Amino acid sequence: MSQHIAIVTGAASGIGLALTRHLLARSNPYRVVMVDLPSSSGASIASSLGENTLFISADVSVFAEQRAVFEKAFEWGNGRIDFLAANAGIADTQLLHGEVDWDGTDQIEEMEMKTIDVDLIAVLQDIWLFKHYAARTRKNVGEGWIGRIVMTSSPAGLYCPPTMPLYVAAKSGLIGLTYSIAGPFAAVERNGRILVNTVLPGFVKTGLPPPSLIDIFPAEHITPMRTIMSAFEMFLSEEGYGKVVECSLEKLHTREKGGHTGYVDESTRWIGEESNALFAEAYERVLEATGKEKEAELEEP
């Protein structure tokens, strides 16, 4: 039968790109479908990585585009999809707790929900699609086939910092989703067993935080990418499911269902309690710049 096929969303940078390279380099390598926005450098990166990668441009918050990804991946994979890394994510695009400047004369505009759409709804839809293609894969591969899903959540889903409440809500949702669906998915034989787990990367250098935040963030509290990859490899090589694994510095910490979600070490405590001012300053600058860009667009003739 053909080589195992992985779909990695948010694959053109950060954790998604590191995971793509990890999957290609394993002793039992995957062929990888890299999914990212058309504006990303995904096409050129996939080309440089060789014939075992395929880039598909898509906005994961648009279901029709997600569905097209799975259709193309299944065809490219010769009738199989084995692993889904639901990794794409964005930070808050509007502050829920921002100041209100409203005199009551105009209608209140709807809040921007792109963060929830990308970080939570798109993951649910990815899993929905994977479940359907898992059934087809099992028919093609045969009994004993095991599918795998790993969601990328965040320690923010546990510690709930005030800087990005929509991001926090979405990442908390992924943690709860893991505990909720992992048992039933692992037990279903007729569609193939699917092992669902979730990784919580510590603060790692990716394109998600603003560059201004990365520049001022203390090096001793930055988790290396190799720690994140070790969590993914654990999920790929073992048959456990329903695990929520937090990555902090050089260590992996399994978070148990039902509470006891205190800080796992001094670094996570520092990030959760003392870094709020750094986050607030960095994201204020981002939102200010975004607001100025929108004002400039409105002023253009």
Image (cartoon, rainbow, N blue to C red):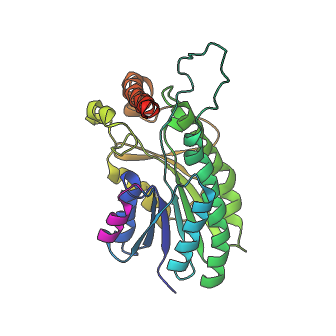
Rendering quarter of residue 247? top left
Which residue occupies the foreground of this view, 107 or 78? 107
Asked whether, in this view, residue 213 is left or right of residue 87, the answer is left
Name the residue furthest top.
Answer: 103
User: Residue 114: x and y, percent?
Assistant: 56, 42
Q: Position of residue 213 (x, y in %)?
A: 33, 32
Figure check: 242 above or below 27 = above
Residue with the most extreme bottom position: 1
Q: Measuring from the top left, give residue 220's x and y in whole percent.
A: 28, 35
Q: Which residues are magenta?
A: 39-48
Q: Main secondary structure of the magenta part?
A: helix
196 to the left or right of 5 = right
Residue 79 is left or right of residue 269, and the answer is right
Residue 261 is at least partly visible in this image = no
Is residue 62 positioned above or below 165 on the image? below
Query: In the rendered image of this protein, does residue 114 appear above or below residue 100?
Result: below
* Front one among 64 and 224: 64
Residue 77 within the magenta-colored segment of the rendering? no
Q: Position of residue 109 (x, y in %)?
A: 63, 29
Spot the residue most to the front. Answer: 301
Q: Is residue 71 visible in the rendered structure shown here?
A: yes
Along the viewing direction, whichever of 131 and 10 lies nearer the viewer: 10
Splitting the image into 4 quarters, where does residue 24 fall?
bottom left
Q: Is residue 185 above or below residue 93?
A: below
* Image quarter hosting the C terminus: top left
Residue 46 within the magenta-colored segment of the rendering:
yes
Residue located at (71% from left, 60% from top): 184
